[in-house]
Amino acid sequence: MIRIVRRLAVLAAFVVVVCSVGARAQALHDKPGRAAIASAHTLATQAGFEVLEQGGNAFDAAVAVASTLAVVEPQSSGIGGGGLFLLRRASDGMEVMIDARETAPAAVDPKDYLQANGEPDRDHAVNGPLSAAIPGEPAGLAWLAKHYGKLPLSKSLAPAIRIAREGFQPDSRFLGELAMRKEVLSRYPASAALYLPNGEVPKQGWTFKTPDLARVLERIAEQGDAGFYQGEIAKRLVDSVREAGGKWSMEDLAHYQVKERTPLTFDYRGYHIVTAPPPSSGGIALAEMLNILSGYDLNKLDRVRRVHYIVEAMRRAFRDRAEYLGDPDFVKMPVAELTHPLYAAGLRASILPDKATPSDMLPGYMAPSQGTHTSHFSIIDKDGNLLCATQTVNTLFGSTFVVPGTGFVLNNEMDDFALVVGKPNAYGLVGSDNNAPKPGSRPLSSMTPSFVIGTDRIGVIGTPGGSRLITMVLEGILAFIDGELPEQFVGNPRYHHQYLPDVISAEKGAFTPDEVKALEAMGYTVSESERRWGFMNAVSWDRKSGQMHAGSDPRGVSGSGVVK
Ligand code: DON
């Protein structure tokens, strides 16, 4: 009898434990039930919802958003470029990064990027066909749809095809950025015909139609990536690039392959960060910075000391970027070491509490200003699938080179290689041999699409911004973990340090005059500029309250974050 009573007591205790665990688990929502999309353009966000409403998931919506951005924001990304797509599937927790980064053509020759006097030829690096790498975006979209989507490309590409054919009215940012690239666009007849009617930057109110692009997208919708990388379109691209001095071949296009990469993951203050592995430098830099910062109680520090430690973490991560990183299929990198907490502890020990560490004895140079080109979007669907993509043609309107009859610019991603080792690229970044171009290799990227996964709150975060992209994502993650919502933190003023130049660059309003003085007294050079940078698009889901949020950077004119 006593034994039976004891057994019952044990059973009762077990039931209580199971029920209370169950009740706790039930307090968290399993599924959002609604979706959130933030992207750089209202039409792209709408395209994402259109495809969700047809039964698509976050990954189909990503195809719709990305292809629509190719039409409405061609200065930033498009099918002539590439991108990194980070996915988390709700049903089984699978996480993967689709690497649709561009590759160097087989005939790449570093001498093409040198002038006769041995100095870097910056024109070849960023303008025209020599600056263009083999695009990855079309293969990335086809891969996403085929392996992770629920809808055929004919449905997920439909909004982009429609907008390309019917036209839309470009916003003031588009027209302003067109003016910035007018001179180089004018060099190439098909580029000028597309973007500069009558040789001029159009006025606001202009309806921009791209029927050629609609036809290329239709071909991809019908044939998948073969519609782009083989056959008539491929031939047109190769002939035209070669005629204008570039080095592409039909084999380069036919051999292009998307790579599935295991995301880089680590923990910070109780949050699990899932982010971009090489060929992006972003995840490694983020891990290094957050590992260093995990040794400080940032919220207990005064603002100047907090900025000091964050900047010193940035400086050290960017030094390693320059030194070690490149394409993982071509070079060996000490990724496990660089992202190890013990390595960060060593770096932390080298930070003095009250003094800036000079980057090194080299004379510095100013990082060129970086804007909003490149495009990031973030999606959570009603089932909790997460998608975070940063995609790009590199600098504004990429190479500016449009192949006649195609309606899109080719990227200038060759400049993300260390074309001349030790010499800065368009973002002031230097690189080692590890990032020198090799036939078929991918240039090192800074793109850092990231998930921040806590027990209650999930954030999906990213932005454009060249080298500054990584530190913007860092600042976004810190703000999210501190409890800020996407609508708030996408607008926060930003600051950045990238090892070389040895300068903190800051948006106006990032620091008070007193903070600048205090930082200068610690040995920093602070360079404030009127220009604002980045275009962060972030979404979040609070599993406790069930609330979803979507924030689009106020720096972008037509950005849009919607929950519905
Ligand atoms: O992959 C990279 O790191 C660059 N091509 C990204 C360029 C970029 O973010 C430009 N935005 N301002």
Image (cartoon, rainbow, N blue to C red):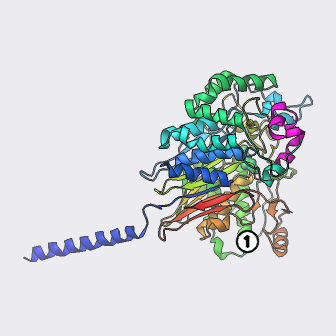
Name the quadrant containing residue 451.
Answer: bottom right
Q: Which residues are magenta?
A: 176-199
Q: Position of residue 33 (x, y in %)?
A: 46, 61
- Nearest the viewer among 188 and 126 is 188
- Above or below for 100 versus 248: below
- Above or below for 198 versus 374: above
Q: Quadrant of the C terminus?
A: bottom right
Helix, strand or loop: magenta stretch = helix
Q: Secondary structure at mark 1?
A: helix
Report whether residue 280 is seen. no
Left/right placement of residue 131 relative to residue 298 reads right
The amino acid at mark 1 is: Arg
- Nearest the viewer among 374 and 521 is 374
Q: Which residue is mark 1?
A: 305
Q: Looking at the image, which residue is at 64% across and 40% down? A: 161
Q: Looking at the image, which residue is at 73% across and 63% down? A: 554
Q: Looking at the image, which residue is at 64% across and 62% down? A: 551
The residue positioned farthest toward the right in the image shown: 117
